[in-house]
Image (tube, rainbow, N blue to C red):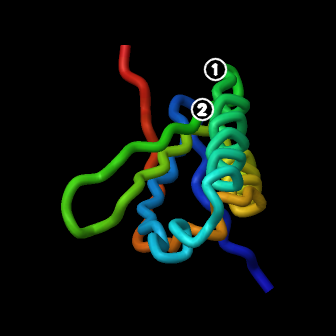
Amino acid sequence: MSTIEAPETLEGWYVQHDVYTVNWPQWRAVAPSQRAAIIAASTAWCTAQATPAQGSSAFFSLLGQKGDLLAVHFRPSLEALNGVELSLRQTDLFAYLQPVYSYLSVRTWSL
């Protein structure tokens, strides 16, 4: 049995782009103090992801009908990218997010 492996890159980083919608009725049903705690924990999680040598993550508000939030994760390996994805799924915020679309790309650097 053979396994198919993702191509390695020596000069680029992997980038995961995830689009989510927010389950607004569920989010609004949460007590304001609990929402504030979830936001604070999510902010701390995102800040902890910003380690230049290991990668970074960011969230962006989206315009239009495709989704509410875009999460972008830059990592040097697919294993590291998988780790950040699993870590995000363990946050309390993720219970209110619904995945809509995602794609993986490789960012190569040119001098």
Determine if residue 41 is in view. Answer: yes
Label 1 and label 2: CA atoms lie apart by: 6 Å
The quadrant holding residue 67 is bottom left
Instruction: Note whether 97 is above or below 61 in the view shown.
Output: below
The quadrant holding residue 93 is bottom right
Q: Amino acid at mark 1?
A: Pro
Which residue is situated farthest in the top direction here? 111
Quarter the N terminus occupies? bottom right
Residue located 51% across and 52% down the image: 16
Instruction: Note whether 85 is above or below 8 in the view shown.
Output: below
The quadrant holding residue 75 is top right
Figure disc tally:
2
Determine if residue 78 is in view. Answer: no
For this rendering, which residue is in front, 98 or 32?
Answer: 32
**What x and y, as percent, mark residue 107?**
43, 37
Q: Which residue is mark 1?
A: 52
Residue located 41% across and 52% down the image: 70
Q: Residues within 10 Å of mark 2 (few under 14, many from 20)?
A: some
Instruction: Note whether 44 is above or below 65 in the view shown.
Output: above
Q: Which residue is mark 2?
A: 56
Quarter the C terminus occupies? top left
Instruction: Note whether 26 is above or below 77 in the view shown.
Output: below
Left or right: 25 in relation to 42: left
**What x and y, as percent, mark residue 78?**
66, 51
Q: Amino acid at mark 2?
A: Ser
Say whether marks 1 and 2 touch (CB < 8 Å). Answer: yes
Left or right: 82 in relation to 32: right
Residue located 48% across and 50% down the image: 71
Residue located 30% across and 52% down the image: 62
Q: Residues within 10 Å of mark 1 (few under 14, many from 20)?
A: few
